[in-house]
Amino acid sequence: MSLRDDFASLVRRPTARRRDNICIAARRDRSSCRVHAGTGAAVSTVRWCAFRNAWGLRTAPASCLDLETSAAGTVTTRGQGMIFPRWPPGPSVTPTALGMPMTDKPVVLITGAAGNIGRSLAGALQDRYRVVGLDVTKGDTNYPVIEVDLTDEKSVVEALERIGTEHGRQIASVVHLAAFFDFSGEDKPQYKSVNVEGSRNLIRGLQRFKVEQFVYSGTMLVHEPCSPGERIDESRPIAPGWAYPRSKAEAEQAISAARGGIPVVFLHLAGVYDERTSVPTFANQVARIYERDFQSHLYSGDTDAGQAMIHREDMIDAFVRTIDRRDQLAGETVILVGEPDAIGYDDLQDRLGALIHGKDEWATLRVPSAVAGIGAWVQDKAEPVIPDAIDQGTRPFIQPFMTRMASDHYALDISRARALLGWEPRHRLEDELPAIVAALKNDPAAWYEGNRIPPPAFVTEAEAIGEDPEALRVRHDEWRRKAHGDTRWAHFVNIALGCWILVQPVIVEVEEPALFWSEIIFGTALIVFSTLSLSWRMAWARWASAAVAAGIMAIPFLFWTANPAAFLSDTLVGAFAFGLAVGTRPEPGTSMVAAMTGPDIPPGWSYNPSAWTQRLPIIVLALIGLLVARYLTAYQLGHIESVWEPFFPGLPDEPEKNGTEAVITSSVSEAFPIPDAALGGYTYALEIVTGIVGARARWRTMPWLVFLFGLMIAPLGIVSILFVIIQPIVIGTWATLTLIGAAAMLIQIPYSLDELLATVQFVRRRTRAGRPWLRVFLFGDTDSGQRKPRTDEFERGPAEVLREMWAGGVNLPWNLALAALLATSLLFTRLTFGADGTMAHSDHLVGFLALTVISLAAAEVARPVRYCLIPLGASTMVTPFLFGADATHSVASIVVGALLIALSLRRGEIRERYGSWDRCIV
């Protein structure tokens, strides 16, 4: 066989003061030892010779040793009888195989060698240098990395001793990359222990080695910044502005004091970037613009200021050149390394905005540093109380200390790097921006992960369902832009309504000072937020407009205005402004995935509970309630002198009042600090406007709104029913209009339950799929199933539309209809059986409760509630014996109670399907 390899290495003999350079040799030239082996059928022979030298200067061979390798793989030293471990058949006999690694490459020691930059630097050096690494963990590298804790002097000494044993004590260059870094701005103890003490421990430990060079990876931020138009050079005073560069400056002082005779080079580097990763400040700036974060439009410093950057390849080139020129860099040398020019913040914003979103100018407003600092402080302190579903559990990147240094400018004079290293950057940030943005768009998830920035929710949500995040974002932006353009007129109308509210106090002569100034403030706010809402990107402004509109509806009764024109105007304008602000397309606040993917009909359902035909009955019934409440409020506020009441008289001590007037001026009504009818009307108005908000799949796109919608109906319904129940019991009379309002509310309730159920099922389903329930609840999500082509729900004939409006998911079986008649009869036992006292009150209470149960059971999803008629029927059978009813009344109560129980047993027809809830409809 033929054996031919190159080897050279330094090994240390325990008994010798000098080193031996061991070579495999039959012939050698000036630069290497060559292996030549004889070949034969049985034995291959290699001669090993030891050349004594003093630190690499070779002399004549001092001794040689012949090794014979048999065909069987046994290695024998001729004349000494040494038998080495079995060799694989036909190997090359090498020093490495004998446990004696040999190379003539100079050693370069890198700290932080398992890190990103460490691996890049090692890759650039390995062709000409033998790379050895130090790091806290070994990592996955193709060069040896020894674990070390730089903060522990003993650990450093042990790691270096191991290097000396395995790789020799002559080191061409030590590149110190390891450092602690964070952007909290806090002076954390790791800055001292890792950056300062760790550097001191390392340079001290190297005193027992022959080190030709020590290279420290520093930062340009240790220098005092300059102003736009100026440049800094190595003579710039050392004046670090925050914890990280301060620790780097202290580390340089420690190295300088302890270096002994080791030459040191301090490379003051600019911010590092490449096509996929960059320093946190720049990466977060890109992310804010990509996400259209509101903060991307704000800056607390001079927008002409900027900071120099350096491409990773150029930085690695600077390190390699520094190492190659180690014999020319004696003593201590400071070199600024980076691209000489710094792009101003505003210019960089515009470039990024154009590349990411196609906008030639990205609006950037300068905020006073003090104001920005307070805002950053509040954001940071509020983070622990903000749900992780919203902020992903991470602290805000912008910290108060950053706002104080936003005007710092770092443009570099790199004359020394050119002169000493022959170095010139081959990249320019302005030229690399397209590649950086392309990398972000091609794989947003990888870009965010590489830059250690929490990705926006749409990225993770899109990937979870197999969608391309960037394609989804583009499609979503195009859809929102078009939909908003089609309905932008609504926000112009709101601007006009705001102008009306602004001047209304003067026109209608509002006398209450609080109401006068409130209308001026709310009118101005509506103008401002409606103007901002003209932009399709400012969905938050639409919700702000809606909040202002809700305030406009409330202020007239909060301040008990005696001005009917102001009350009417505020109520109508507020309701219209609310609906126009958030009731138009596109839905504000809905996640991209929820808006662009997912079905309209819930999985397993036979119809869509959020369809307009399902919501209109609720809106119509709420309108009836609003009109009743508005009429009663006018009496309570003194705008009218009487109210209509066709049936019920007033109380004996107030004969001038009818039943309705007595009820709405009773002690029960006056217990509220505001007119209770006005509060009811306000809730009805909110029901109407929230009923029109949201697209046809809002059961999954706006779960929180559906939940709020249901909550407004249920509590208001309970209050209305309780108020009707207590009228004859506590007040002593009835009010016809409140009975009409309660009836409208009873009919409303079943129509709201199916959408509420679909939303609860959806949130539970997505939570089981691993999605954060709070985020799903607040911003919606996709769901299983395909979205069918959408058609106009009102293109059908009127009869079909009306049938679906009143019958979709709601039907009243004949047995429950009969039970409703029986329950109604209990309300009139005062008239039919002459009941009075407790017996009459009992019938009245049970009758209304039974009607409430029947109303709920009319919804197919709540049909099991009908079984509540059983205890109500049983109580009806028992009460005559408890409260002393006459015989006729007792018999009637027993019959009615028994019928209620019997009629509750039949479920009735279920026409629709409700997914997993079907099995619960018994």
Image (tube, rainbow, N blue to C red):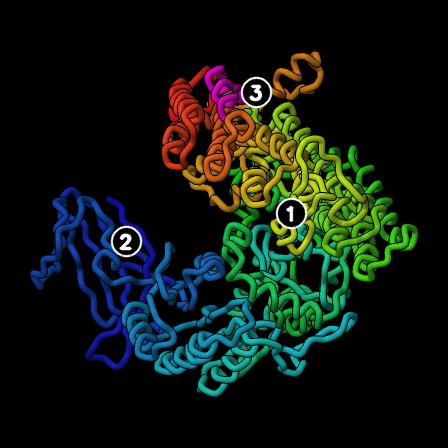
Choose the circle earlier in sequence order: 1 or 3. 1
Q: Secondary structure at mark 2?
A: loop
Left-right relation of 326 to 547:
left
Which dot, 3 or 2, sits closer to the camera? 3
For the residues marked 3 and 2, what is the alpha-carbon distance in whole angstroms?
94 Å
Q: Residue at x 17, y 57 (%)?
A: 67
Task: Specify whether residue 586 is painted magenta.
Answer: no
For the residues marked 1 and 2, what is the alpha-carbon distance in whole angstroms?
55 Å
Q: Amino acid at mark 1?
A: Val
Give the camera-side residue of 713 and 239: 713
Q: Position of residue 417 (x, y in %)?
A: 63, 71
Give the camera-side residue of 845 and 796: 845
In the rendered image, the vertical position of residue 500 relative to residue 133, given as above or below: above
For the residues marked 1 and 3, what is the alpha-carbon distance in whole angstroms?
50 Å
Q: Main secondary structure of the magenta part?
A: helix
In the rendered image, the vertical position of residue 656 relative to residue 201, given as above or below: above
Q: Secondary structure at mark 3?
A: loop
Magenta residues, start to end: 809-823
Q: Position of residue 43 (x, y in %)?
A: 15, 48
Q: Amino acid at mark 3?
A: Gly
User: Would residue 540 be seen by someone viewing this image from the given angle?
Assistant: no
Quadrant for the C terminus in the image:
top left
Residue corresponding to mark 1: 437
Left-right relation of 481 to 418:
right
Residue corresponding to mark 2: 36
Residue corresponding to mark 3: 808
Q: Amino acid at mark 2?
A: His
Q: Residues within 10 Å of mark 3 (few under 14, many from 20)?
A: many
